[in-house]
Structures are given as structure tokens and as C-alpha cells.
Amino acid sequence: MSGTTISTPLDGGFGGRVDQVVDRAIGDGRIVGAMILVARRGEILYSRAAGLADRETNKPMTADAIFRLSSVTKPVVATAALTLVEANVIRLDDPISKYIPEFRPKLADGSEPVITIRQLLTHTAGLSYGFRQPADGPYHRAGVSDGLDQPGLSMADNLDRIASLPLSYVPGTGWGYSVAMDVLGEVMARATGVSLPELVDRLVVQPLGMHDASFAVRDRSRLVTPYADGPGKAVAMGSYHRVPFADGFIAFSPGRVFDPASFASGGTGMNGTASDVLKLLEALRSGGSPVINPETAAAMTTDAIPGIETTMPGWGWGLGFGVLRDPLAASTPQTAGTWRWGGVYGHSWFVDPALDLTVVVLTNTAIAGMVGAFPDALRDAIYGRQV
């Protein structure tokens, strides 16, 4: 880390450094609004609602603002799935065909491999995401939804489209971020005979008091307006909005959340507040109570795919999110064993268990709030890293 200095994480000046990062991003127009929470051992050391929930009406961001959580949904649904594993309703090594017999994707050679629940949780099932493919890639041609667009699309139709395409690799032999959590959500619903939204509410949301976490929006007046990266400042999303990402694009339909016919996406479909997210992460950090037992929480937050490389240098994957293997390779001041992820509507979060540190950053700006200069600078400000 040549040229880098490290001071004590969460030293007396960290709040001022975070403020500078946030003020700069909002002043430059790259981020419209954000809600940020930093906690240590459960104590909130920094809390700020910054910028605007709606720029056009000059509506300020508030601490209880509701965000479209996108992939911040994943740890919630993964936790719910693991409660079902603990109850012996499902098992990690069960083939998913046991629950969704019609979902039988094949390899390019026509053979039909077994896909397990564990492989869905670890994104080693051979599936993909449309946004990880070029604009003319197979998922786009088949009309597969990443769970963010196509209001009114049913789960049955989306599963048919996914299963019609060849798997990217033999399940268990590689890693690819994917629609696996959507498939897992359907497994959970089939295994219990209860809808995914009801399951998640019963198993995770209610026990943890995540009052606004839901697949629906319980108070539209608190739902933030979504924005997207623009050529200069962020631009308001339309009813259908494409945002360039990697070699392709991410397709957003913000109104999807208001269409009850839209399938409940286990990977991207929930809404909630920063406080809701913090409650889940703190529960997992402190051993999983009252939703899962300590052994399950430990398995969830430990690298579950040793020997398999992800597309993120230095990062492995647990049962629901990334786990840091090598801070140097990842170019991060976080401690090895840190777990984190984000959401394409503009979110990032991480837990550094060695420091008992939990950080939640929800913004209304895709993609700048999730990856790139803003979340990296915010992380470095918390750790006191200056490059």
C-alpha cells in the first residue's frame, strides 16, 4: 500500500472525514441523497441523512426514508432461508429440482446437472445476471429479468426463460453473480407453501423489528425518488431506465414495486430503511439471535467457496454476500473476514467483525452510491486511510 497511511479506525476525526466525502459527492451532483449509519458494538457513532430524497421538489432526505433495496435484499432472504435449514424444512445440499421440478437448466452439451440450495446461496449454480452480459447476451435475448424491471412478469415465466438458456459452467466449479437468489426464493415458497414476502416477514422482519422492510412499500410518502448516473450530475430515472455497467447495462423499472403482479425477487425485490438494514447486520454480527443460531451465523459470514475465484480480487463468498480473503489483493483497509455487499439502486454496506464495526450507506443514486469513488472514499474516511 505504497503512499497510504492508516490511522486508527473510527478515531475522533472520522465523522468529519465522512462529512467531507458526503458533502463533496452531493455538491458535485454525483449523489442526490444518502442515509448513513456507522455503528460499533451496536452503538451508533455516526448517523446522517444528507442531501435530497427528491431533487425536483427539494425534499430533504430523512432518517426514516425508504429505499428500493435492490441487492440489499439478498442477506435478508439468505437469513430467512437459513432459518428453514435450521428447522429441517430444506437442506443446503437438497437438489432444487426437489422443489421446482420443472426448472431444469442444462449445460451447453445438453447434460442436466444437479443444482443445490447451497450453490444458489453461494452463486456457484452456473446461472448469471443480464447486466453481467453484453447488450446482446443470451439473458437479454431471452427476456430474463434481473428482478429490477419488467413490472408484472411472473416467477413462472422468468424461470422458464432462465431454464431455456445453457448454464455458464458446471455447478459447483465456478462463481458467477446471478439470479440464483430469485430461484432460491421460489424454492422457499414451494417448500413451505407460503409466499416469499410472507416468509421473510415472519422469519426475519418481525423478529428483528425491521418495521419498514417489505416487498411492498408501506408508506409511499417516505420512498425516495431514484436517480441514475448521468454524463454530469445524476439524472432522474424514467419509467424504464438503462444505466451502463461493465460491458452491458442494468435495466430499471422503478414502478415495478407498485405492481402486485411482479414476481417477488429474492435477489432485489425488497424496500426498507437504513435502520432496517442495520438491525439485520447487527443481529448477524452478534451471533444471529433471535433469527438464527450462532453456528449458522458463523457459517453464513465465513468464506464458503475456498478454492473458487470470484470476479472480485481478494474476495470470496459466504452464504449470502462477499467475504474478504485478502485485504491487499482487494486494495481495502478492511480486516480479513469482513463481509459486505451493496445494491444497484445505490447502496453499500459492510461488517468488519474484528472491529465490531457495521456500516450502512443507502443512497438514491445508481450506480455511484454502490461502487466507485463515493463508497470507496467513505470506507477510507472511516478507517482513516489517506492515499
Image (cartoon, rainbow, N blue to C red):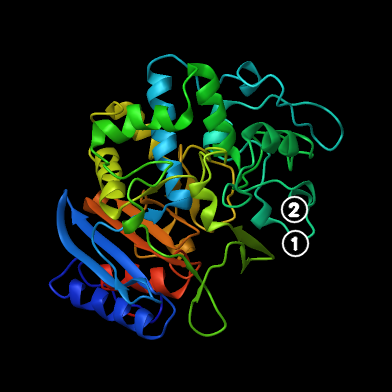
* Any part of residue 324 in sight: no
**Which is more N-terminal, label 2 or label 1?**
1
* Disc 1 residue type (three-letter): Ala
The one of 15 and 25 positioned closer to us in this rendering: 25
The residue at which mark 2 appears reads as: 140
Q: Quadrant of the C terminus?
A: bottom left
Mark 2 nearby-residue class (10 Å; few <14, some 14–19, many ≥20): some
Q: What residue do we see at 46% from left, 21% from top? A: 194
* Disc 2 residue type (three-letter): His
For the image shown, how many numbered marks are present on the structure? 2
Which of the 4 quarters of the picture holds residue 152? top right
Q: Please say if 215 is above or below 103.
A: below
The residue at which mark 1 appears reads as: 135
Provide the secondary structure element on which disc 2 rests.
helix
Q: What residue do we see at 43% from left, 45% from top? A: 270
Tell me, for residue 27, which label it has, or none.
none
How far across and how far down the image is residue 101, in percent?
A: 69, 19
The one of 245 and 316 positioned closer to us in this rendering: 245
How far across and how far down the image is residue 180, in percent?
A: 59, 38
Q: What residue do we see at 42% from left, 52% from top? A: 69
Q: Please say if 102 is above or below 46.
A: above
